[in-house]
């Protein structure tokens, strides 16, 4: 999961605002009453919904539809409990419950497609498909007007890796100058797809659906929104994602092609969950010709109300070529709900890595001992497929579900973790004390529960903000002219309620939970570099010491820091490539966090190291570029 970037200029423009004014415009009693409704007040029985997935496409669809139908009544109760019946809460909860009860996720998963009519029949909804028209271009226009949103535009070359760039840049230091406008969104739509990351935490209307995803999946989930004008030959070049995604088309049409995962052993230095992103190219012809062992699995056009499921690591590409006229009402809008198991260390590869770090055991098999190492490249991709698939599997989806026996879940996951770790490498497995395997699983569960609760609170806060805005609009509906303008004018107090500020405390809690797990793992490994003196470092060394190309860092995306590699460094401006392959340019030094102090160089202090994960061809090209640069400097 990735959080949208927030410009430094925008933050600086509001640094002087009084945060205490928020209390005068929010309703603590109301939000606390919602928060007090526990996620486990209504025990949803998923055991009764489990079924074996058929091998055929029709069998797969029917089994999932059966689960959706079976969960409809309990999902209605969930929606009524949170007063979300008008926000299609029951429909979203039933859909995600049906998908959650499937074991077919990740590299062992299988994509599927559900038509609007099938969903309508499964939910027995006489009022129509709740997903069709749930979020329209008019809703987007209102969201941009009402809030302080940020977005990126994706590249459209299906022969190169997918890159993103900011839709808006501050035009000045004032609030209005820093806000993204609908005109900027429309201009970006002429060039490519506009991406609103974590839209469920920023846009109140989308928060209820995202909360439904979290509660039904028992996971810290996120929602991204993708907007594409009609008639685009490529709206997203071929790429893979780190998340299992549920795509819901709410307006317009989008054509999807989905392929089986590339064989990681054919390009072991490539991240299988970030193929076709950044500098990694996954051209369409390579998929169509079956390179890397890929086969086309789905070729479908989603219409409003349709649903598509794509497991993590499955390449996909999209376009909006059709006979539809390029007008706002035909603009394609789809919501992507992320099952973020790999993002939050909820897989066996991450669990094994943390256990070895805790035990201080060198990972001689996979060479993944440093926190900044990309665990999805290198030796892991050379493992035998059955072992690799087990290692990359997500932990069971009831692992964080406190309506179940969490201690039993820990025992079951620990046993599976030990089995897989022994198959990966008996020597490193034997070197880890038995107690550490279980202790590691418990720590991962503790972090997961914290992240789950933080995400729920974040979405509940967005829901409450949406209700407060509606109440304010109703109170001023009788006004006209200047009186109406004054009543609805943006004030410093209202600014503090915008998502830009509302989400920050939740992002900080997410960072804190991630840091706690990383610190726990490092406590037992004693990885301090010999000869280094931590006391000699400045307290803020992570944000002040020099950063160079190739450094493994964490970079700021809207207040939350995520693993990244520095790809360009110049002055106080840095370009980075994130762990999932996305690229962000022009970050300030305060937005780039070093993970370890720079080591003293025995050679040229200006010597740059190549970014990790380059192919031989890319490495050769990089070295030639460095040689030309040195020649110009007179080295």
Image (spheres, rainbow, N blue to C red):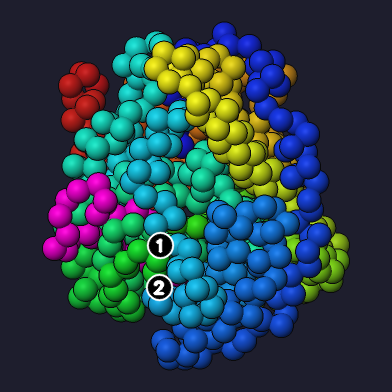
Residue 321 higher or lower than 50, as above or below: above
Residue 500 higher or lower than 196, as above or below: above
| Residue drawn where x is 34% and y is 12% of the image | 172
Front in this rendered view, residue 99 or 440: 99
User: Does residue 216 appear anywhere in the picture?
Assistant: yes
Q: Quadrant of residue 95?
A: bottom right
Q: Marks 2 and 1, how far apart in space?
A: 8 Å
Residue 71 percent coordinates (x, y): 65, 75
| Residue drawn where x is 28% and y is 75% of the image | 299
Q: Secondary structure at mark 1?
A: loop
| Residue drawn where x is 52% and y is 73% of the image | 125
* Left or right of 338 on screen, residue 302: left
Q: Residues within 10 Å of mark 1 (few under 14, many from 20)?
A: some
Pick whichever of labels 2 and 1 is earlier in the sequence.
2
Residue 414 percent coordinates (x, y): 77, 69
Q: Secondary structure at mark 2?
A: helix
Segment colored magenta: 307-334
User: Does residue 556 appear anywhere in the picture?
Assistant: no
Q: Quadrant of residue 583?
A: top left
Q: Quadrant of residue 288?
A: bottom left
Residue extending farthest to the front is 478
The residue that label 2 is drawn on is 116
Which numbered marker is on residue 132?
A: 1
């Amino acid at each position: 999961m990735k959080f949208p970037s927030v410009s430094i200029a925008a933050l600086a423009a509001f640094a002087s605002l009084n945060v205490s004014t928020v209390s005068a415009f929010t309703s603590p009693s109301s939000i606390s009453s919602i928060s007090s409704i526990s996620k486990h007040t209504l025990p949803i029985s998923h055991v009764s919904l489990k079924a074996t997935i058929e091998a055929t496409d029709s069998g797969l669809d029917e089994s999932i539809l059966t689960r959706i139908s079976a969960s409809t009544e309990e999902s209605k109760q969930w929606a009524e409990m949170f007063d979300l019946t008008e926000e299609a809460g029951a429909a979203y909860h039933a859909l995600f419950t049906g998908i959650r009860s499937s074991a077919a996720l990740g590299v062992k998963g299988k994509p599927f497609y559900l038509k609007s009519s099938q969903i309508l029949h499964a939910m027995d909804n006489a009022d129509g498909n709740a997903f069709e028209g749930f979020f329209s271009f008019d809703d987007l226009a209102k969201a941009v007007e009402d809030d302080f949103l940020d977005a990126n535009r994706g590249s459209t070359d299906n022969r190169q890796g997918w890159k993103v760039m900011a839709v808006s840049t501050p035009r000045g230091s004032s609030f209005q100058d820093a806000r993204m406008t609908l005109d900027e969104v429309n201009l970006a739509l002429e060039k490519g797809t506009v991406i609103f990351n974590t839209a469920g935490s920023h846009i109140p209307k989308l928060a209820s659906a995202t909360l439904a995803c979290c509660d039904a999946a028992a996971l810290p989930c996120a929602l991204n929104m993708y907007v594409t004008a009609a008639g685009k030959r490529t709206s997203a070049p071929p790429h893979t994602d780190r998340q299992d995604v549920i795509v819901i088309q709410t307006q317009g049409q989008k054509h999807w092609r989905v392929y089986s995962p590339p064989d990681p052993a054919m390009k072991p230095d490539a991240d299988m969950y970030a193929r076709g992103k950044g500098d990694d190219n996954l051209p369409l012809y390579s998929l169509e010709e079956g390179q890397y062992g890929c086969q086309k699995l789905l070729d479908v056009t989603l219409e409003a109300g349709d649903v598509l499921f794509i497991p993590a690591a499955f390449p996909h590409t999209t376009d909006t070529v059709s006979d539809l006229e390029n007008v706002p009402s035909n603009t394609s809008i789809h919501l992507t709900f992320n099952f973020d198991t790999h993002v939050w260390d909820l897989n066996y590869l991450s669990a094994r890595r943390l256990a070895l770090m805790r035990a201080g055991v060198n990972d001689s098999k996979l060479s993944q001992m440093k926190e900044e190492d990309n665990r999805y490249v290198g030796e892991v991709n050379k493992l035998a497929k059955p072992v690799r698939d087990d290692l990359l599997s997500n932990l069971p989806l009831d692992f964080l579900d406190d309506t179940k026996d969490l201690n039993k879940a820990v025992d079951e996951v620990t046993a599976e973790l030990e089995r897989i770790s022994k198959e990966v490498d008996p020597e490193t497995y034997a070197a880890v004390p038995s107690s550490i395997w279980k202790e590691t699983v418990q720590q991962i569960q503790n972090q997961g529960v914290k992240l789950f609760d933080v995400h729920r609170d974040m979405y509940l806060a967005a829901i409450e903000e949406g209700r407060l805005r509606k109440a304010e609009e109703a109170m001023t509906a009788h006004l006209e002219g200047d009186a109406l303008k004054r009543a609805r004018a943006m004030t410093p107090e209202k600014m503090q309620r915008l998502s830009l500020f509302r989400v920050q405390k939740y992002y900080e809690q997410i960072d804190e939970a991630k840091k706690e797990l990383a610190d726990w793992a490092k406590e037992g490994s004693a990885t301090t570099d010999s000869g280094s003196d931590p006391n000699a470092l400045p307290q803020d060394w992570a944000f002040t010491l020099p950063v160079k190309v190739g450094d493994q860092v964490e970079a700021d995306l809207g207040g939350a820091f995520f693993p990244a590699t520095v790809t360009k460094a110049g002055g106080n401006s840095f370009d980075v490539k994130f762990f999932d392959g996305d690229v962000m340019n022009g970050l300030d030094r305060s937005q780039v966090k070093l993970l370890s102090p720079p080591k003293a160089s025995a050679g040229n202090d200006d010597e740059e190291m190549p970014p990790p994960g380059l192919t031989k061809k890319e490495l050769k090209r990089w070295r030639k570029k460095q040689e030309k640069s040195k020649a110009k400097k007179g080295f």
